Image (spheres, helix red, strand yellow):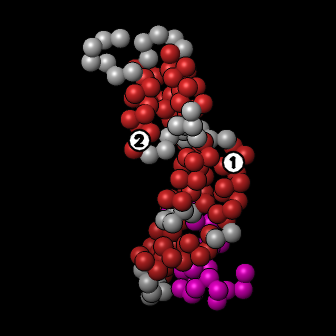
């Protein structure tokens, strides 16, 4: 190992100190720094064994931070991109769907706060929420009524 070269474990810890990373993310980010085959796998195995890499914490962190602004489908995309367990991702997304309309309404309220005045504004509000990954049904209910989720017949 060269004088100025940081170990793979050191690089991984530096990344993990900023935010939670999945094993797949660390593999992707650090593979270019591997000098001998198997070196990165060994470093990641050790960090995982010591609890520095924890897929459940990654999942919870993403859901907690991103579900405030994004719908279930966008959160699913972000979780899948991190290479997390498909069953855990499916369960997290299913849990989010129960609050989809309330979360869509809160995002809509902060951005617009008033029902659309015309068809153009209706389309703008719909597109805004749809691009954030909220379901079409939740978006329709929120934009059509501008009402709180409690006002709707679920």
Quadrant of the rendering where the N terminus is positioned: top left
Residue 29 drawn at (x, y percent): 44, 30
Q: Verify whether residue 134 appears in magenta.
A: yes
Q: Point out the residue furthest to the front here.
A: 50
Residue 68 drawn at (x, y percent): 51, 66
Instruction: For the residues labelled 1 and 2, say whether their Cβ atoms are less than 8 Å apart.
Output: no
Name the residue that disc number 2 marks.
Answer: 17
State the extent of the magenta-drawn residues as a range. 132-154
Residue in front for this viewpoint, 34 or 45: 45
> Separation of disc 1 and disc 2 at Cα?
24 Å
Residue at 47% across / 10% down in the picture? 36
Name the residue that disc number 1 marks.
Answer: 88
Q: Verify whether residue 130 appears in magenta.
A: no
Q: Which mark is residue 146?
A: none
Q: Earlier in the sequence, mark 1 or mark 2?
A: 2
Judged by depth in the image, the label closer to the viewer, 1 or 2, is 2
């Amino acid at each position: 190992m060269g004088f100025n070269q940081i170990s793979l474990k050191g690089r991984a810890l530096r990344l993990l100190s900023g935010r939670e990373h999945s094993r797949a993310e660390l593999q992707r980010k650090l593979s270019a720094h591997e000098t001998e085959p198997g070196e990165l796998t060994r470093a990641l195995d050790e960090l995982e064994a010591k609890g520095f890499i924890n897929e459940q914490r990654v999942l919870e962190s993403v859901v907690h931070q991103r579900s405030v602004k994004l719908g279930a489908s966008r959160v699913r995309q972000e979780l899948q991109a991190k290479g997390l367990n498909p069953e855990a991702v499916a369960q997290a997304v299913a849990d989010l769907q129960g609050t989809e309309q309330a979360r869509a309404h809160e995002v809509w309220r902060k951005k617009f706060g008033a029902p659309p005045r015309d068809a153009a504004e209706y389309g703008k509000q719909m597109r805004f929420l749809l691009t954030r990954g909220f379901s079409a049904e939740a978006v329709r209910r929120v934009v059509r009524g501008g009402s709180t989720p409690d006002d709707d017949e679920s």
